[in-house]
Amino acid sequence: MPTKGLSSHHPISEEQFQQQVTDLAQVLGYDMIYHNPDSRRMQAGFPDLTLISTSRGIVLFRELKTSKGRVRPDQVKCLAAMQAAGLNAGVWRPEDLHNKHIERDLRGQA
Ligand SMILES: [Mg+2]
């Protein structure tokens, strides 16, 4: 078990990651931020976050995973269906925050 703080890439929990993502979305003007409180009460596969910026006219559906978290088949199926229907759907991981991928998606620059 590695000691906390030893690694500069100390892994964060999905809950911490979600907080960072929704904080950033708010800073960037997202005014409608929905997250599934408990995946067990959701129909299987629906993404964790639905983010809407009414000023930008952007709706993002995102499944959040930790760096090593696995995207389940039901989640893959839902995201693929959304993408096939032309929706902006995908997976975000903590590294996407650090490399600005999430910020670009939120700004509509993807
Ligand atoms: Mg998730």
Image (cartoon, rainbow, N blue to C red):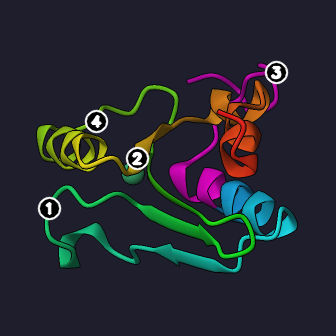
Residue 41 horizontal side relative to residue 54, left or right:
left
Mark 1: give few (<14), some (14-19) or many (20+) Cα within 10 Å. some
Helix, strand or loop at label 2? It is strand
Q: Nearer the viewer, residue 85 or 35?
A: 85
Label 3 vs label 1, nearer the camera:
1
Cα–Cα gap, marks 3 and 1? 34 Å
Point out residue 106 in the picture as x, y percentages from the top left corner. 69, 50
Mark 4: give few (<14), some (14-19) or many (20+) Cα within 10 Å. some
Query: Which disc is residue 85 wearing?
Result: none
Q: Nearer the viewer, residue 18 or 89?
A: 89
Image point (69%, 46%), residue name: 108
Task: Report which residue position mark 4 lands on.
Answer: 71
Above/below status of 73 relative to 7: below
The answer to whether mark 3 and mark 1 are in CB contact below 8 A is no
Q: Amino acid at mark 3?
A: Ser
Label 2 vs label 1, nearer the camera:
2
Task: Report which residue position mark 2 lands on.
Answer: 89
Q: Earlier in the sequence, mark 2 or mark 3?
A: 3
